[in-house]
Image (cartoon, helix red, strand yellow):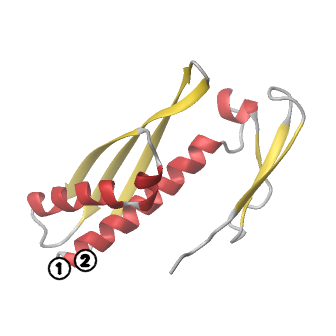
Amino acid sequence: MSIKKTGSAEWQGSLKEGKGTVSTQSGALKDNPYGFKHRFEGEPGTNPEELVGAAHASCYSMALSMILGEAGFEADSIKTEATVTLEPDDDGFSVTHIHLDTAARVPGASESDFQDAANKAKAGCPISKLLKAEITLTAKLDS
């Protein structure tokens, strides 16, 4: 079984003065603006790194939920933030690092149970597998 989802982007103009829109198949994003100023100068709108971060955080949270379930636990809550680092390199720019910061409430889970599941989710999440950047994790089990 394979699942295919699409995202699309349109762009007009030069790198610094141009502008674009990004949309998703589901309609969750529809013609959201993006551009150089959104990416590098803090102008409101989205950018590729933010979208990768949101995708990674949501994928990781789902993977963690699955792995906890396989171990006999159900999370009351999982909150994950992915910080994506974009740095200049010899070819322009590269995403060099993504840090996942997750906190979860998991009744009955020990710290060891939780850390084991958190690390398995980091390695097994489909978005983690997609990325070649270094991925680090801080996982906190809330009481």
Left or right for 54, reference 36: left
Q: Nearer the viewer, residue 142 or 55?
A: 55
Query: What residue is drawn where x is 45% and y is 40%?
Result: 83
Mark 1 sits on what residue?
72
Compute the Cα span from label 1 to label 2.
5 Å
**Residue 105 tag number:** none
- The reply to whether residue 76 is visible in this rendering is no
Q: Position of residue 132 (x, y in %)?
A: 44, 42
Q: Give the amino acid at mark 1.
A: Gly
Q: Give the amino acid at mark 2.
A: Gly
Q: Are marks 1 and 2 in contact (CB under 8 Å)?
A: yes
- The reply to whether residue 2 is visible in this rendering is yes
Q: Quadrant of residue 99?
A: top left
Q: Quadrant of residue 124?
A: bottom left
**Local secondary structure at mark 1:** loop
Please, is residue 73 above or below residue 118 in the view? below
Query: What residue is drawn where x is 34% and y is 47%?
Result: 101
Mark 2 sits on what residue?
69
Left or right for 56, reference 89: left
Q: Residues within 10 Å of mark 2 (few under 14, many from 20)?
A: few
Q: Residue furthest top?
A: 90
